[in-house]
Amino acid sequence: MGISRFLWRDAKGSILTEYALSSLVIIFTLLTIMEFGFEVVMRQQAEHGVTQAATRYSLTGSSEQAQDAGAAVMLSAFRECVAPLDIVLYDDMTSIAQDLGRQAEGTGSDASARIAQITLTCSWTRVTPIVRAVLGPRMTQSSTTIVRMR
């Protein structure tokens, strides 16, 4: 009984200990929320970028101009993660269903294509240690769109 009474009365450091433990949980929770928010923004940026790249490619047929258009609409912090566009050309709708596409070469043979499938991929390192341990060290977002050539 004497020891439990002694422990009950000696509470000088208990508030500091509770604060230290609870603040770690709160900080990790906030960082995780920020990480997922970052990923949502990145997904939106990739989708907007691939839309602009597809529009530019359908008008010009230039993969360089499409890459520039896709990167131009993204926030500057996200431009570093953008990989080169993957452009697959198709002659008609049935070739899409049969996966009979060909990579864009930037030559005259690309002019016969009537449909282009454009994929923009962004990849970046996760910041939060808990999210990194659970979901892996890198986040990769791929956005694909199909556009009719003009």
Image (tube, helix red, strand yellow):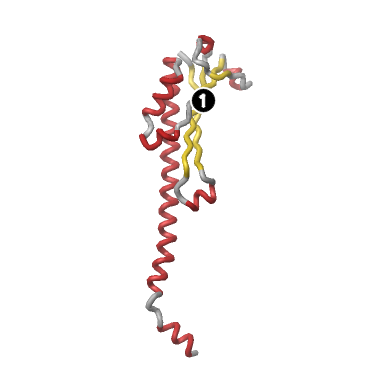
Residue 55, quarter of picture: top left
Q: Residue furthest right?
A: 98
- Estimate the x, y position of residue 73 in percent, counting from the top left: 37, 29
Binning the other alpha carbons within 10 Å of mark 1 as few (below 14), some (14 to 19) or many (20 upward) gives some
Q: Which residue type carries mark 1?
A: Asp
On screen, residue 108 above or below 14: above
On screen, residue 133 above or below 123: below
Left or right: 87 in relation to 55: right
On screen, residue 75 above or below 18: above
Left or right: 13 in relation to 102: left
- Estimate the x, y position of residue 71 in percent, counting from the top left: 40, 28
Left or right: 19 in relation to 148: left
- Estimate the x, y position of residue 145 in percent, counting from the top left: 49, 26
Residue 38, quarter of picture: top left
State whether residue 55 appears in this view: no
Residue 74, quarter of picture: top left
The residue indicated by pointer 1 is 86
Q: How many dots with numbers?
A: 1
Q: Residue furthest bottom?
A: 2
Residue at 53% x, 47% y: name it. 135
State whether residue 25 appears in this view: yes
- Estimate the x, y position of residue 22 in percent, counting from the top left: 42, 64
Q: Secondary structure at mark 1?
A: strand
Residue at 43% x, 55% y: name it. 29
Residue at 49% x, 32% y: name it. 121
Q: Quadrant of the C terminus?
A: top left
